[in-house]
């Protein structure tokens, strides 16, 4: 499974996640803070052994991150740092081009007709990141069921989907303050929360891929994503069913509450036969 790597706000670790070695990252960040700098001065500032600094500077020069100052003698030469914005812009462009070329090549490697696996997701960050990627690829329809916390995190992505002309249906647990696409308020969110022990997020894109996740009161997250046809179909039917219920309760709410109870207890009790209601 492809997971979302979480790193702290340490520039050295973040640079390392982009492919620099730890020494390269340490030397580059140190060079940004004090330039121009000699190799010896840079090693001292970066907390590196002097035996490693010359090789590291040569690697940074090769990558275009360190520039030797013109006119300096070889011994005692000073260096300046490449502009960070230029480096990151070039890195972003190169990664986007590589990903675009790699995607169809990797897809072609998969055997035709392979049954899709169901992949677990175990963190809220990974759930939201996966949802944003799914929404970014939507071309036909999006069905999503979610709570205010997740709606806030995905509101911008959902808005972009609507702007692209993709059909969107949202089942919102809790009264929504913003409507995106066709938005439906689920009428018994408190009862559902108690039953599940937390919030839920269910998303289906283009009838081709689906994700389900539960955010528990304990902080634990249990989720799954798949392109498996049975998984996708069952997940989409689940959201569609909730849409049907919200439409019916919006029109016949008072009558249904008299028949099934204030929280529709008798409706949600699947072991209670119709004739027993």
Image: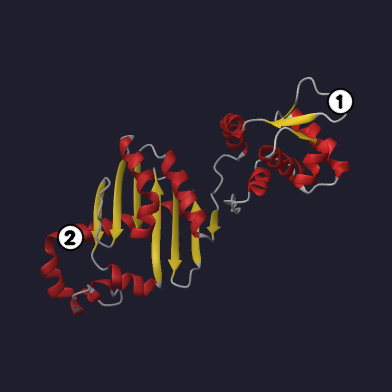
**Secondary element type, mark 2:** helix
Q: Position of residue 131 (x, y in %)?
A: 44, 49
Q: Position of residue 149 (x, y in %)?
A: 37, 59
Q: Is residue 204 left or right of residue 125?
A: left
What residue is shown at x 86% (from left), y 25% (from top)? 74
Determine which of the numbered discs, if any, sits on residue 54 in the image: none
Mark 1 packing: few (<14 Cα in 10 Å), some, or many (20+)?
Answer: few
What residue is shown at x 75% (from left), y 25% (from top)? 69
Q: Nearer the viewer, mark 1 or mark 2?
A: 1
Nearest to N terminus: mark 1 or mark 2: 1
Place residue 44 in its image quadrant. top right
Instruction: Name the residue tied to disc 1.
Output: 74
**Secondary element type, mark 1:** loop
The residue closer to the viewer here, 179 or 171, is: 179
Place residue 245 in its image quadrant. bottom left
Q: Position of residue 18 (x, y in %)?
A: 65, 41
Instruction: Name the residue tied to disc 2.
Output: 248
């Amino acid at each position: 499974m492809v997971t979302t790597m979480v790193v702290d706000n340490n520039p050295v670790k973040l640079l390392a996640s982009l492919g620099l070695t730890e020494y390269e990252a340490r030397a580059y960040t140190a060079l940004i803070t004090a330039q121009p700098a000699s190799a010896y001065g840079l090693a001292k500032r970066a907390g590196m052994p002097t035996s490693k600094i010359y090789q590291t500077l040569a690697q940074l020069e090769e990558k275009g991150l360190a520039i030797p100052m013109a006119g300096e003698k070889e011994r005692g030469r000073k260096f300046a740092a490449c502009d960070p914005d230029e480096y990151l812009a070039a890195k972003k462009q190169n990664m986007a081009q590589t990903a675009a070329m790699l995607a169809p090549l990797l897809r072609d490697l998969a055997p035709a007709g392979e049954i899709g696996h169901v992949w677990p997701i175990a963190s809220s960050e990974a759930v939201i990141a996966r949802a944003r990627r799914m929404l970014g690829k939507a071309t036909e329809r999006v069905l999503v069921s979610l709570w205010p916390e997740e709606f806030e995190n995905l509101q911008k992505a959902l808005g972009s989907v609507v702007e692209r002309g993709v059909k969107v249906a949202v089942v919102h647990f809790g009264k929504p303050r913003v409507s995106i696409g066709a938005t439906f308020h689920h009428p018994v969110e408190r009862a559902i929360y108690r039953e599940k022990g937390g919030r839920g997020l269910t998303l289906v894109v283009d009838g081709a891929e689906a994700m389900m996740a539960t955010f528990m009161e304990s902080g634990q997250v249990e989720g799954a994503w798949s392109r498996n046809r049975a998984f996708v179909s069952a997940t989409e039917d689940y959201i569609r069913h909730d849409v049907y219920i919200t439409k019916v309760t919006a029109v016949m709410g008072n009558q249904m509450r008299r028949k099934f109870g204030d929280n529709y207890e008798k409706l949600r009790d699947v072991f209670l036969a119709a004739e027993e209601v």
